[in-house]
Image (cartoon, helix red, strand yellow):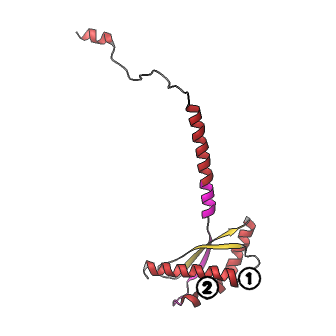
Amino acid sequence: MVDAARARKIADRIQRIVAEMLDRRIKDPRLGFVTVTDARITADLRDATVYYTVFGSPEEKAASAAALESAKGVIRSEVGRQTGIRHTPSLAFVIDEVQENAQHIEELLVKARQSDAEVAEKATGAKHAGEADPYKAPREDDEDEDE
């Protein structure tokens, strides 16, 4: 086990190495416009997860995922060479859904604002149901009986 600061530094280094490899050395035609967004490594430095986004259609995303899987060995050997740690971590490529989730949240917020505006529009000029003073006051004839 290593401390969290060292693991984060190694993860950042892995992210830069993978991004550079995809930009300069991996020439797979299936590889689309891929951006490496994050890398995380386990505390024992055995497994690294690389998060990426792909600009394009679902078919292009699938083709890019296949290209990354086929280039995993070359990328892993370069990570091992450049990081210099004793055991080269195994790599797992995971598509980062942050952009899609953020877009979905924005759509939900727009719908909520529209719904709030509709409710506010319907509420203008509306009157409360029932009496103006909804609380019961004691009847006057009850007081007469007590005396």
Other residues around mark 2 within 10 Å, as few (<14) / some (14–19) / many (≥20) = some
Quadrant (top left, top right, bottom left, bottom right) of the N terminus: bottom left
The stretch drawn in magenta includes residue 100: yes
Give the farthest residue toward the left.
Answer: 147
Q: Amino acid at mark 1?
A: Lys
- Residue drawn at x 71%, y 72% is 33
Q: Position of residue 82 (x, y in %)?
A: 57, 89
Real-space Cα distance between discs 2 and 1? 16 Å
**Left of 57 or right of it: where is 130?**
left
Q: Amino acid at mark 2?
A: Arg
Which residue is labeled 1 in the image?
27
Give the farthest residue toward the right.
Answer: 29
- Residue drawn at x 58%, y 82% is 90
Q: Nearer the viewer, mark 2 or mark 1?
A: 1
Which residue is labeled 2 in the image?
76
Q: Position of residue 37 (x, y in %)?
A: 60, 72
Q: Earlier in the sequence, mark 2 or mark 1?
A: 1
Q: Position of residue 26 (x, y in %)?
A: 70, 83
Quadrant (top left, top right, bottom left, bottom right) of the C terminus: top left
